[in-house]
Amino acid sequence: MSNFKDFMDEIENSSAQSLPECDLTLPAIQVALTAAVSGLLLPSLISHNEQQKFSEEVSNLVKDESFLAELSNQIGEPLDPESEDEFVKRGSDALRQLLYDKFGIK
């Protein structure tokens, strides 16, 4: 496996659809992501239906093949002196920036 997209494709194609050495499945991650995004939106300004729609849009976006490929290209492979925690943080920062760009958040 050479990049993040290959990693996600391998998980998605596995029978259990779970992350290695972890009990989380892709649907569980999607539910958690939807809940997290909903929690970030101001309830008084946005209706529940709009929150749900936006959360689903974000969840669908991060599963999209072209989005995963773009994220994978931005992350690249772990750098030589980079720890696992540093790599995860770099990947998280790249994901956050891509989402900001896609949804026009500054």
Image: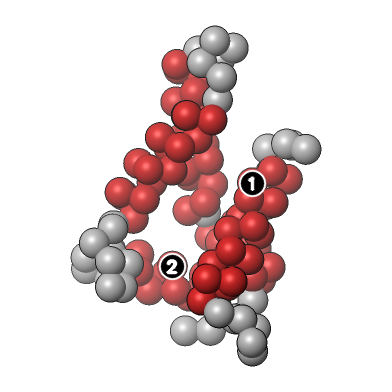
Q: Where does residue 84 sit, x and y in percent of width and height? A: 51, 76
Tell me, yes or no, whether the two marked residues, 2 and 1, touch with CB atoms within 8 Å: no
Q: Is residue 26 left or right of residue 67?
A: left
Q: Is residue 51 above or below residue 12?
A: above
Instruction: Name the residue type under label 2.
Output: Met
Residue at far right of view: 106
The label on residue 79 is none
Q: Which residue is mark 2?
A: 8
Which residue is painted at 78% across and 38% down in the image? Answer: 106
Q: Where does residue 82 sit, x and y in percent of width and height? A: 61, 81
Q: Is residue 42 above or below residue 31?
A: above
* Residue in the foreground of this view, choosing between 35 and 80: 80
* Residue in the foreground of this view, choosing between 85 and 41: 85
Which residue is painted at 64% across and 89% down in the image? Answer: 80
Choose top left, top right, bottom left or bottom right for residue 101: top right
Q: Where does residue 23 sit, x and y in percent of width and height? A: 24, 62
Mark sitting earlier along the chain (2/1): 2
Q: Where does residue 30 sit, x and y in percent of width and height? A: 38, 46
Q: Would you say residue 101 is visible in this rendering? A: yes
Instruction: Name the residue type under label 1.
Output: Leu
Check disc 2: other Cα within 10 Å, few if <14, some if 14-19, many if 20+: some
The label on residue 99 is 1
Which residue is painted at 59% across and 12% down in the image? Answer: 45
